Amino acid sequence: MKTTIDQVKNHLDETVTIGSWLHNKRSSGKIAFLQLRDGTGFIQGVVPKSAVSEEVFELSKTLTQETSLYVTGKVVEDSRSPLGYELQVTDVEVIQEAEDYPITPKEHGTEFLMDHRHLWLRSKKQHAIMKVRNEIIRSTYEFFNQEGFVKVDPPILTGASAEGTTELFHTKYFDEDAYLSQSGQLYMEAAAMALGRVFSFGPTFRAEKSKTRRHLIEFWMIEPEMAFMDHDDSLQMQEEYVSHVVQSVLQNCKLELETLERDTSKLENIKAPFPRITYDDAIQFLKDQGFDDIDWGDDFGAPHETAIAEAYDKPVFITHFPVEIKAFYMKPDPDNPNVALCADLIAPEGYGEIIGGSERIDDFELMKQRYQEHELDGPAYEWYLQLRKYGSVPHSGFGLGLERTVAWIAGIEHIRETIPFPRLLNRLYP
C-alpha cells in the first residue's frame, strides 16, 4: 500500500510503501538508518541486516544523499521521533541515484545556499519554513472568508503608483508607460465600493536596493479593503486577523516550529487586543530612551521600531503619523489635520512593521486637493478620483507583508529564507 509520511499515523503496524528521497543516512554494523523525506514530512527508516536480504542491506549502506527511492516497511511507534513513528524497512528500490549533491550536511554560507535555493528547499529547516508560510496563507483565506470578504485580483502591471513614490519598476505596455505593482490597494478600493469587503493576495515590487534582513525587492501582500469601516474598525480587524493567523500556526505547525527551535511561548500570548500608542507618544518614548536621531516629522527606522516593540509582549500599533510622511490617500484626523488616521503594526522581537493601514480619504474635494499637491494628474489616476464622486463612503484598508510575517512567526533571522524562489535564483537580489 502506497502512502505518504504525514499519513503513516493511519497505518500503524501495517506494511506500506513510501516514495521518498534520502535526506541523510548512517549505519552501525548490522543496522542502517535512513532519514527519508517525501515533501509531507521526514521519517526514519530502520534497516536491520537480519530482516532484509543481503542485497537490500548493502544497498542501504551505499545510498547517496537525495537519491530517490521507493521504501517499503512496517509502520511502528517510536517515542524518540518527532513524528512519533518510524519505518521498519523490508525493501528498498532505487528510482534515480543522485551523485555529488552540492548541499552536504556540513555548514554552508547563506549566499551559497541562496544560489542553490532550488535545492536548499529540501532541507528540514526550509521545509518547515514553507509549511509555516503555507499555514499563514491557508488561515488568511479562512479568516477573510469567515468575515465575509471576497477575493479580488488586482493587475500586476499598473499605470499608477499607489504610494506616490518613485521606487517603481518601469516597463512599456506596448506604447504606454507601465509599472510593476507596488500595491493592489487602489484597485481594492474600487472593488470595495462594489462588494463591500474585499481582499487581494499577490506579488508586489519595490525598486530599491536594500541589503538588510528585513527588506525584499519582491514580496507578497495581503490587502483587505472595507467599505463603511473607519480607522478604529480597521484596527480591530487587523488585530483579530493577526491573532487568528498566529494561533492557527501554533495549532497546526507544532512539528515545524519545533524543527525551527521557535520559542512558542512568545507566540502564545498573541491575541487581540493589541496595545496602541500615538506617533507623538512614540517620539517622546524614543527620546526618553536616549535616541537623539529622530524628531517629530521623521519616519521610524529599524532601531526605533525595535526599541518600541521591546516595550511590549504583543504587536503594537503606532497611530496618527504626520500627514506629510504618509501616502496621499490617507484621511487626516478631523481633530488634528496634521496627522492621518493611520497605523503601522510593529511585530515583537525586532521584526519591524508587518502591517500598514489607514482610513482612506472619502471626500471628493479633499482628494482633488491631494491630487494637486502630489501632481497626480492624467487618466492613470482619474478613475480613482471618481470613486469619491459616485457614492463615496467611509472606508479603510491595510496591507500585511507575508514574508516579514513568516519571518516573525517562524523566528527566522533572514527574510530571504521565507521566499520559495528569488527571481533568477538570487541574481536580482543585492
Image: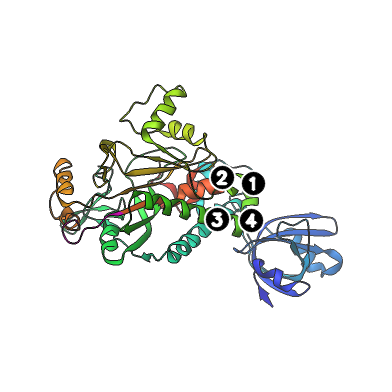
Residue under the image location 33 percent in, 57 percent down: 225
Q: Residue at x 30, y 61 (%)?
A: 154
Residue bearing the label numbered 4: 254
Q: Which residues are magenta?
A: 388-395
Q: Which mark is residue 261?
A: 1
The structure's colour scheme is: rainbow
- 3D distance between C-alphas at marks 2 and 3: 11 Å
Kind of residue sitting beneath label 2: Gly
Q: Is residue 237 left or right of residue 226?
A: right
Secondary structure at badge 2 equals loop
Residue named by callout 3: 132
Cα gap from disc 3 to disc 1, whole angstroms: 13 Å
State if disc 2 and disc 1 touch (CB < 8 Å): yes
The mark that comes first in sequence, 1 or 2, is 1
Viewer can see residue 90: no
Q: Amino acid at mark 1?
A: Glu
Q: Amino acid at mark 3?
A: Val
Q: Earlier in the sequence, mark 2 or mark 3?
A: 3
Q: Residues within 10 Å of mark 4 (few under 14, many from 20)?
A: some
Q: Which residue is mark 2?
A: 411
In the rendering, which numbered label is found on residue 35? none
Q: Position of residue 249 (x, y in %)?
A: 56, 56
Residue 43 location, x and y as percent? Answer: 70, 61
Pick the residue in front: 246 or 157: 246
Mark 2 Cα shell of 10 Å, populated few (<14), some (14-19), many (≥20): many
Magenta segment: does it hold 391? yes
